[in-house]
Amino acid sequence: MGCQQNEKTSTKKEPTKKVEEAKEKEKLPETPISMIGEEIEKEPAGELFQKYSRAKELATNEEYSPTVDEAIKEYIQTMKKVETKEWDARKWAQSLVTNFRTQYSDTIHPMKDFEVKYDKLTLPDGRLLQDVDEEELSKSPDKVNVAILLDASGSMNANVPGGNKMKLAKTSLKSFSESLPKNTNVSLSVFGHKGTGADKDKKLSCSSVETVYPLKNYSKEKFSKALNQFKASGWTPLASAIQKATKQLLQASDEHTKNFIYVVSDGIETCGGNPVNAAKDAKKAKMDVQINIIGFDVDNKADRQLKEVAKAGGGEYTSVKNKQQLDDEITKSWKESMGKTTWRFWVAGNHNNINWDSVGMSNQLRKLFNNHITSRNRELERMNEALNQLLEDKIIDLDTKSATSDFLFKRHEAIKNYADTIQNEKHTEIFDTAERLKKIIDRITKDLDL
């Protein structure tokens, strides 16, 4: 009775086991196969690709190929255990994709995220050139005010190699003013031009700080006339001249105004003022100002004082002894203090930088795109290798293989077209940005009259 009962029990369990095995063999992959590039990009890595090949996908063939062999071997062994007689080409394509597809986000996201950035192209004020938008460029250039202060004390009547100091100074200042950009306002003030160097005239001379050309755009005729209104004669009220120029500039300035005070002098303060403190007060005023000084044929004492004044005013000091040096400093150093020379070198250098950076970014993008091409082609190759093995092992027939191959190729073309579009758009962005930056440089060049 006991044996009979055991046999009955065994008979009841056997069918259940066979049903479970049959269900397992009929189980099909559920993930649909997409033919849309954007959807393919979001799909996860294939199970066998993730297990064997993903870490070596972009490695050499010697490292990569064995991983594919292992993946295909496991795939074929699994397929032999699955009931696939009713599978059509789409189901086979679905199975191959689910197991062997690459992780496209690994190679497409780096292209999408590639930053077109010309980070070497910084403006003299530190900003990236490409951060300057068209709206800002369409605005009028920031206002620039230039206040020229000319020492007309009696010592400026002396001669130096090249001619009379006062005449040479006037000629150089005229040339300098003529070369200023169109958006620049200029004024000319003279100090110490009344009375004489005698003690009896000191009060008159020390109070003589006169603006002979008020702050406005340069007019060749009116500026020349202003230069002819005075001669060198008296004392040196340098501090008063700086104070008066500071007041005038402050009245004509806003937060976007750049101010310069340029001084030509051949001696120290002789009217009891403190030009160093006057320069410091100018820097403390609510405006952007810089004081630059040329010491024209000065002695050591004047050289030291004028240097301190320029330093206090945040500018440069230069000592000159003759006509050539004076011309060089006024036409070169003073312009450079306004940024024109700086901009000129900047413009020349950065045209080349744009070209080099464009090529460099294009090459970087090409490397990323090549990684994608490698990934894309290897995906199709391993799927086709698996497909060939299925045919060789007679798991599928030739017609099924051919039809499945068509599905896989269409999917391959879909992701190819999608990735090509991303690469082309990014490549276009690189060179469109380059052209925009070149136009900005040309705009700057024109505005600064370089």
Image: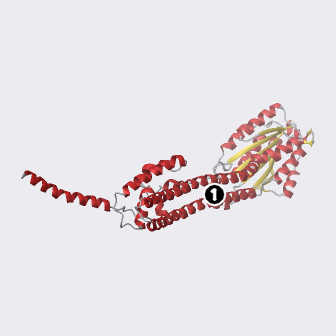
Q: Secondary structure at mark 1?
A: helix
**x and y, in percent, of residue 100 in the image:** 45, 56
- Residue at the spot x=81%, y=34% of the render? 302
Q: Would you identify the image quadrant in which residue 223 lies? A: bottom right
**x and y, in percent, of residue 144 in the image:** 72, 53
Residue in the foreground of this view, choosing between 310 and 65: 65
- Residue at the spot x=63%, y=50% of the render? 119
- Residue at the extreme left: 1
Q: Would you identify the image quadrant in which residue 421 lies? A: bottom right
User: How is the rendered protein coloured?
Assistant: secondary structure
- Residue at the extreme top: 300
Q: Is residue 118 left or right of 409 when viewed as pictured?
A: right
Quadrant location, the C terminus: bottom right
Residue in the foreground of this view, choosing between 29 and 8: 8
**x and y, in percent, of residue 136 in the image:** 64, 59
Q: Would you identify the image quadrant in which residue 275 lies? A: top right
- Residue at the spot x=69%, y=44% of the render? 282
Q: Is residue 14 left or right of 240 when viewed as pictured?
A: left
Residue in the foreground of this view, choosing between 28 and 40: 28
Tally the marks: 1
**x and y, in percent, of residue 80 in the image:** 36, 57
Residue 319 visible here: yes
- Residue at the spot x=70%, y=57% of the render? 438
Task: For label 1, count other residues whose C-alpha is less than 10 Å away and answer few (under 14), some (14-19) or many (20+).
Answer: many
Residue in the foreground of this view, choosing between 183 and 190: 183
Q: Is residue 450 left or right of 51 when viewed as pictured?
A: right
Disc 1 marks which residue? 430
At label 1, which amino acid type do we have?
Answer: Ile
Residue 252 visible here: no
